[in-house]
Image (cartoon, rainbow, N blue to C red):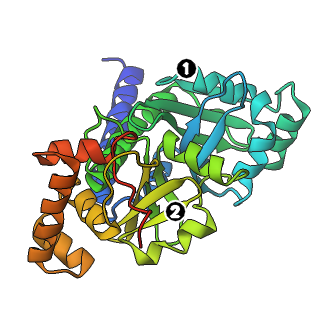
């Protein structure tokens, strides 16, 4: 083996070991920290392997004929709180964003303040986004796209091919572990989708959100910008489990450790359940036991059993699977918000 080849092989092995250590650390974060700080802490760990100045990630809707791309859930490292709101002002003209959204699963890179749109170029200069590297993934269960963007300033080197490969491999792990966390909290089958669900911290910041839930909130509260739940909803989070009205919609709020699961319900045209019955039914359909539901709702297991028996009778279902299907159906679920 030539001396240069030997040095290259040693470098590759060192990189492989460092990447393996990073991925193992990511797995520990997923187990120990849960969803609250998982992505941010995971990217900070990856930063030791692949340096970057700032980062932005979240869930985004792609552009269509009537609307530009929109970020609905986002997090950031070394970027101001106003970053997403600033980007939204010129999102429809952002060439780099359109490129990444049109090429899911690919790492897209660029360098320089070269966007032909003046506002986009000014935005990039304002936040020192000289070197860019981004990847997006389709999220069929949410109806949105997951994205991660890394940035470097003008004094730093551009992201190279090797770094792009590491970034792609790391984001595969990051996305899979994040989806597992969300799936475990919501307890949904990815084949059925979860576009009408959301997961939030107690301060109202979103960790996951589906496109249907986004559309419903924006319809009822025009101008809502995503990322943080509306103040009306945040005020109800400490009261979970509960059901609240939001205009023409009803939201079921269910506690899950330090998070709250939000489930969108449309207006009922079928059987009517009392709010406590419906909440018990939602928790049961989500996989909670009688004892767990009784503890969450401060009821006796016998009362929970009575509630569920009434739900089965009123909805005409015979299994937990049928119960979950009817509760999520826009044409036959119970209007839990009709009665106090």
Res 140 → quadrant: top left
Task: Residue at 39%, 29% (x, y): give it.
Answer: 7
In the displayed image of the protein, which residue is found farthest to the top? 1
33 w.r.t. 104: above or below: below
Horizontally, residue 243 falls left or right of residue 276, namely right
Mark 1: few/some/many CA within 10 Å (<14, 14-19, 20+): some
Task: Residue at 71%, 31% (x, y): give it.
Answer: 67
Residue 57 in view in this figure? no
124 w.r.t. 255: above or below: above
SS type, badge 2: strand
Residue 208 in view in this figure? yes
Choose between 301 and 25: the one closer to the eye. Answer: 301
For the residues bearing labels 2 and 1, Cβ distance under 8 angstroms: no
Q: Position of residue 172 (x, y in %)?
A: 37, 35
Q: Position of residue 165 (x, y in %)?
A: 45, 28
218 w.r.t. 303: above or below: above
Mark 2 vs mark 1, CA separation in Å:
39 Å
Choose between 239 and 323: the one closer to the eye. Answer: 323
SS type, badge 1: loop
Task: Residue at 23%, 59% (x, y): give it.
Answer: 281
Please report whichever mark, 2 or 1, sits nearer to the chain's N-terminal start: 1
Horizontally, residue 307 falls left or right of residue 136, namely left
Res 109 → quadrant: top right
- Nearer mark to the viewer, of 2 and 1: 2
Q: Which residue is mark 2?
A: 245
Q: Which residue is mark 1?
A: 103
Choose between 299 and 19: the one closer to the eye. Answer: 299
Horizontally, residue 314 falls left or right of residue 327, namely left
Q: Quadrant of the C terminus?
A: bottom left
Q: Position of residue 275 (x, y in %)?
A: 34, 67
Q: Quadrant of the N terminus?
A: top left
């Amino acid at each position: 083996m030539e001396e240069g080849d030997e040095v290259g092989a040693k470098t590759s092995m060192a990189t492989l070991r460092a990447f393996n250590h990073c991925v193992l650390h990511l797995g520990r974060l997923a187990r120990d920290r849960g969803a609250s700080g998982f992505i941010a802490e995971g990217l900070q760990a990856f930063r030791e392997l692949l340096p970057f100045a700032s980062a932005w990630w979240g869930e985004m809707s792609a552009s269509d004929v009537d609307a530009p791309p929109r970020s609905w859930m986002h997090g950031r490292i070394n970027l101001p709180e106003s970053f997403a709101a600033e980007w939204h002002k010129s999102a429809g003209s952002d060439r780099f964003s359109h490129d990444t959204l049109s090429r899911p699963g690919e790492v897209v890179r660029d360098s320089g303040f070269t966007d032909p749109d003046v506002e986009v170029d000014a935005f990039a200069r304002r936040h020192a986004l000289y070197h860019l590297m981004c990847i997006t993934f389709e999220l069929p269960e949410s109806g949105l796209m997951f994205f991660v963007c890394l940035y470097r300033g003008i004094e730093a080197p551009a992201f190279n091919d090797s770094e792009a490969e590491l970034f792609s491999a790391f984001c595969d792990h990051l996305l899979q572990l994040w989806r597992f966390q969300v799936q475990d909290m919501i307890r949904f089958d990815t084949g059925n989708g979860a576009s009408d669900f959301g997961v939030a911290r107690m301060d109202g910041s979103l960790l996951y959100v589906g496109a249907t839930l986004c559309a419903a909130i924006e319809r009822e509260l025009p101008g809502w910008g995503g990322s943080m739940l509306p103040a009306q909803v945040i005020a109800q989070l400490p009261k979970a489990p509960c059901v609240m009205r939001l205009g023409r919609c009803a939201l079921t709020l269910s506690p899950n450790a330090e998070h709250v699961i939000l489930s969108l319900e449309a207006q009922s045209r079928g059987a009517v359940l009392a709010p406590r019955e419906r909440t018990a039914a939602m928790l049961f359909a989500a996989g909670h036991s009688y004892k767990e539901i009784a503890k969450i709702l401060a009821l006796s297991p016998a009362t929970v059993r009575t509630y569920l028996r009434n739900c089965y009778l009123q909805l005409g279902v015979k299994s937990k699977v049928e119960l979950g299907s009817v509760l999520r159906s826009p044409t036959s679920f119970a209007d839990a918000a009709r009665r106090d």
